[in-house]
Image (cartoon, rainbow, N blue to C red):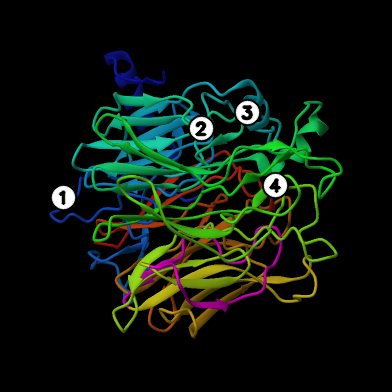
Amino acid sequence: MGRTKGSLLLLAAALLACADVEGELEGSELGLAAAKKPVKHDRPDTWPMAGHDAHASHHNPVERQISAANANTLRPRWVFDNLLGEDLGALHGTPVVTQDAIYVGSNNGRFYALSLEGELLWDYVTLPANPLLAVLATPAPVGGQIPVLYGTPIVGGAVYSERENVVVFGDLDGNLYALDGTTGAEVWVKPQVDAHLLGGVVGNSLALADKDVVVGFAAIEDAALLIPQLGIPYQCCSHTGFVAAFDVKNGKQRWRYDTIPPAAVQPLPSEAAPFTLGPSGADIWGQPTYDAETQTVYVGTGQNYSPKPGGGGTPTSDAIIALHAKTGKVKWIRQITADDIWVSGIDSPDANGKWSDQDFGDAPKLYNLPDGRKVVGAGQKSGAYTVLDARTGEVVKTTQIVAQANQLGSLQNGGAYDNGRVFVHGLNNLTPTTSTGPFEGVVKALSPDGASVLWSHNQPMSVLAAPLAVANDVVYFLAPITETNPGTDPQQFTLIGLHAPTGTPVSGFSHPGRAISGPVVANGRIYLVTGNRAIEALGSNDHGSVIALELPP
């Protein structure tokens, strides 16, 4: 099992760590000092899961303090960036913020709980990774230093159940953990829920559905063709994407739905020479969504890593699927892109337009059209935004918003919805006839059916991959700033705020360190986390941090 720091000795060490952080900040690049005066919050102004809520809106409707009029005055309140003098590791998942704490997991295998004033409350170390994953997940040296891997990496977000005071998260080896939100003590741990050597929780793929936590499982098997280059035999590919529901209180599994059947040996010659097993993939790495009224869970799936025997993909890849929330039985399946098969090591796309990697990484957001029709809408790596009837799965509208730029895809995970507007973001290919030309980062506001672009904000050659956040008519996102002297300047990222009705920029806050996690707006503050080991194009950064921004007094 994992371990928590619960003894008096370790508690003292944790307090010393907080004191060290405070001293370090005074001389840091940000020039920040930890705040000492606590702030009282009288409202349930929280962010309990990656998409904020079970509808994956990424919108905090309670926030009223930070607005378009004053967002440009935001300033740091505190920064937490080391534990006992060591780097926090890369923080990838969108943090969870409650009325009492901030929770975030690290690529180094530790899960952190901080107070709202940036003090370490407790940390927890995950189970050791299986031997293959340990080799693949061990971070490469940066600047001559080899980062420490304490447990299995955590690369996604968590969920917090206020009813049980429990925070739940998963790791890259398919283990699930439920910890007491106050003490960090284990409530339950379920090892190897995903038994595949490369399968686990690979994104912000957890959501609350009443008394259950619904978890999507994916794999890093998209790197399967590269593994033999390390001298490790590996057959591509065999991971089965799935989603499962667990009782938050005791971890009992309610149901499990596998998106595809188990892999079989491919007949030779297969559809493409690298594939020896299949089908595989149709993974779930975006947040599931939940409709309490109809007892429905919605998930988006990724591409197939390998074809079925005889060729072709499965009918559940690149699809949105509706499941019964109590049983996991299928209500409907709507595939948008058929026969999409891709792994690293083959062209995307090839000369015949195959192998395009057109996942639904974006969560199926649940909302109503102006005529009252309930729909789910999600952006796709293809650059299209699709709206489906939530009851039947009928396609209401699929609209091409941008052109697919490269292997990162176009529309990214973590789009948002607020007050009759859909917000999408990602990369737009400026030369659609090629996949290697110039691109621009985009944030766009769409009509609820996705058919009309209300406004667009563009940033040349900017990889906009982190999720969005919306609060009080401001859309927030993180954007990298191009280095003036590549390889010598520490890369800077900027938190940009756009006026939600018009797209007009209203704020910007720059900080050092690469970041791929989405911002969170809660209790009158904006919380950012930094670090990157997931997107190669942005460069590695194990010196993760948690930053709290607030308005001046």
In the rendered structure, which segment of residues is drawn in magenta?
392-419
Q: Is residue 507 left or right of residue 137?
A: left
Asked if marks 4 and 3 touch (Cβ < 8 Å), the reply is no
Q: Which residue is mark 2?
A: 194
From the viewer's perspective, is the residue at label 1 or at label 2 nearer?
Answer: 2
Marks 3 and 1, how far apart at CA: 43 Å
Q: Can the viewer see residue 416?
A: yes
From the viewer's perspective, is the residue at label 4 or at label 3 nearer?
Answer: 4
Q: Which residue is mark 1?
A: 40
Percent of width and height locating residue 415: 46, 65
Marks 4 and 3, how far apart at CA: 25 Å
Marks 1 and 2, how far apart at CA: 41 Å
* Circle 3: element type: helix
In the image shown, does 33 or 381 lie closer to the viewer? 381
Q: Earlier in the sequence, mark 2 or mark 3?
A: 3
Q: Which residue is mark 3?
A: 133
